[in-house]
Structure formats: structure tokens, C-alpha cells
Image (tube, helix red, strand yellow):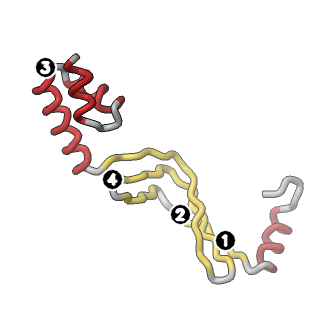
């Protein structure tokens, strides 16, 4: 909003420009990605229609989840690193994360 502008005047100006807003009552918004999900809890969702073009404005508490397949693959990678290096699960996971998922670099680093 523009500071000092009456909300009713703002609505009237938006109507003149052909902009309509509608609040969507939502409890959660989920955006599915190839490698996981973005979950928005307690969202404020506004649907904006501007000359036939619909857009959504979403705000709220955001958290990300990786896909189950990604999670399973990550677990298998960590187990393999543990077998090859003799390190604990925590050490293997931290080093794998530090090496951005590069298994070979992780094994080399932990083997030194």
C-alpha cells in the first residue's frame, strides 16, 4: 500500500485500472518441484486479476522438503560412504553436504 492513501480510494483506483483482488482462504500452499516441495504454512493468498491475467501473491511461513526418492538416494549414498571410510553416519552426512553431494570427493576426504 501507498502510505497516507485511504484504502477505499486505493480500491477505487484499482477498479478504474481493471484490477480486481480476491483473498483466498487457505490453510497451506504446496509447490511441487522436481526435487521436492515448498510448503507455505498459514499463508495469506491474494488472487489478482489484471485485465484477464490472473496472478497469485502468497506469503507465510516457508519450509522446504526434498522428495522421498531424493531422501532415499541420499541415505544410500551415506551408507556407501560409511562402508568405504569406516566413519559414522553423522560424519559421512556432514562431509557429503559440505561437498555438495559429490560422493567421490567425500570418500577421498574422509579416507585421508
Residue drawn 68% across the image and 82% down it: 51
Q: Which residue carries the number 2 mark?
A: 25
Total count of labels: 4
Label ID, residue 86 = 3
Marks 3 and 1 sit apart, C-alpha to C-alpha, by 59 Å
Q: Say whether disc 4 or disc 2 marks the residue closer to the N-terminus.
A: 2
From the viewer's perspective, is 88 left or right of 17?
left
Q: Secondary structure at mark 2?
A: loop
Check contact, mark 4 vs mark 3: CB within 8 A.
no
Q: From this viewpoint, which residue is outermost toward the bottom?
A: 52
Q: Residues within 10 Å of mark 1 (few under 14, many from 20)?
A: some
Where does label 1 land, which residue? 21
Other-residue count near label 2 (Cα within 10 Å), few / some / many at <14 / 14–19 / ≥20? few
Kindly give the residue lying farthest to the top in the view shown.
Answer: 112
Q: Earlier in the sequence, mark 3 or mark 1?
A: 1
- The 10 Å Cα crowd at callout 4, few under 14, some 14 to 19, many 20 or more, is few
| Residue 32 at x, y percent in the picture | 38, 59
Residue 105 lies in quadrant: top left
Looking at the image, which residue is at 64% across and 71% down? Answer: 48
* Residue that appears at 48% across and 46% down: 62
Instruction: Name the mark nearer the viewer: 4 or 2.
Output: 4
Helix, strand or loop at label 3? It is loop
> Residue 9 versus residue 74: which sits nearer the camera?
74
Residue 79 locus on image (x, y percent): 14, 32
Q: Position of residue 103 (x, y in %)?
A: 23, 35
Amino acid at each position: 500500500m501507498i502510505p497516507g492513501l485511504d484504502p477505499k480510494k486505493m480500491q477505487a483506483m484499482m477498479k478504474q485500472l481493471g484490477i480486481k483482488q480476491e483473498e483466498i482462504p487457505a490453510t497451506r500452499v504446496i509447490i511441487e518441484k522436481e526435487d521436492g516441495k515448498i510448503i507455505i504454512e498459514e499463508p495469506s493468498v491474494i488472487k489478482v486479476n489484471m485485465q484477464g491475467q490472473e496472478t497469485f501473491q502468497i506469503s507465510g511461513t516457508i519450509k522446504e522438503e526434498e522428495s522421498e526418492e531424493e531422501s532415499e538416494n541420499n541415505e544410500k549414498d551415506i551408507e556407501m560412504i560409511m562402508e568405504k571410510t569406516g566413519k559414522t553416519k553423522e560424519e559421512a552426512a556432514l562431509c557429503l553436504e559440505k561437498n555438495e553431494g559429490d560422493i567421490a570427493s567425500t570418500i577421498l576426504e574422509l579416507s585421508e
